[in-house]
Image (cartoon, rainbow, N blue to C red):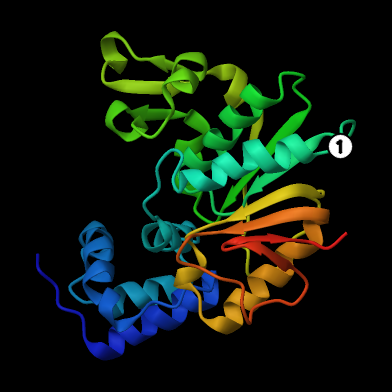
Amino acid sequence: MDVKITNQEFALFQRLIYRLAGINLSDAKKVLLVGRLSKRLTHYGFSTFSEYYRLLSSRQPPEEIQTFVDLLTTNETYFFREPQHFDYLRNQIIRGRSSGNTFRIWSGACSSGEEPYSMAMVLADAMPDGNWEVFASDISQSVLARAQAGLYPLERTNGIPKELLRKYCLKGVRSQDGKLLVASELRKRVRFAQVNLTMPIEDIGDFDVIFLRNVMIYFDTETKRKVVNNMVPSLKRGGYFIVGHSESLHGITESLRPVRPTIYQNPS
């Protein structure tokens, strides 16, 4: 069933996803929204998007709100995306750290897990003493479940350096043929949790490095400031805050100083 969406209906969903997740859904995303939500209309037997919006507004069933958020916040990612950041992590940050305290890194918008597992591979390889932790968060419960499984199609693992692929990944056989499993020694070192970055963040500890990459492009300026201000208190003095190559913190925060494009530091 091909259901059309009116401008008024689209505006309702724009406001709803902004309120729930801080995402500024542009008018150009109307086709994407229709494509992702049409299956929910079919599921409930609705003939209009207004009916689905009323269902969400009623919060009955309550889990449908999470489904709605999951459908509109799932973004593309892959292993070792923007590899310069992982080179900087290994060659500058890890090498320059002082020994002793546990090295902690946060993947703020981890999606299906490729970013935090890329972090874990670098840390395991560069810090054989094992004195490190990875914390990974996302607003979507469905992608967090996939991330925890650590199972990926082989074609999605092309970015993994060959030596790390051999050390930390297992090629599937029989029923898992064509898939790759992140080794259990890494999976158990990455902790996943649902976090809404637009809300106050508590009880996650302090971090030496925070990655918040390729997500702020979906936020307006006010939401960017809110998100960064929520995250910076968890960054240690001297710690690094890394954003995507198409992103910048210019005009967003004055509490971090630029080290190089896309890489910022909390002054010590």
Q: Residue at x 71, y 43 (%)?
A: 93
Image: 83 above or below 30 = above
- Counting the numbered discs, the total is 1
Left or right of 155 in this view: 139: right
Left or right of 241 in this view: 237: right
Q: Residue 37 at x, y = what percent?
A: 28, 64
Q: Residue at x 45, y 73 (%)?
A: 17
| Amino acid at pointer 1 | Ser
Disc 1: CA contacts within 10 A as few (<14), some (14-19) or many (>=20):
few
Residue 132, by quadrant, is top right
Q: Residue 86 at x, y = what percent?
A: 56, 41
Q: 2 and 260: which one is in front?
A: 260
Judged from the image, the secondary structure of the residue bearing numbered disc 1 is: loop
Q: Residue 254 at x, y = what percent?
A: 75, 77
Residue found farthest to the left: 1
Image: 152 above or below 110 = above
Q: Which residue is mark 1?
A: 98
Image: 64 above or below 102 = below
Q: Residue at x 33, y 31 (%)?
A: 158
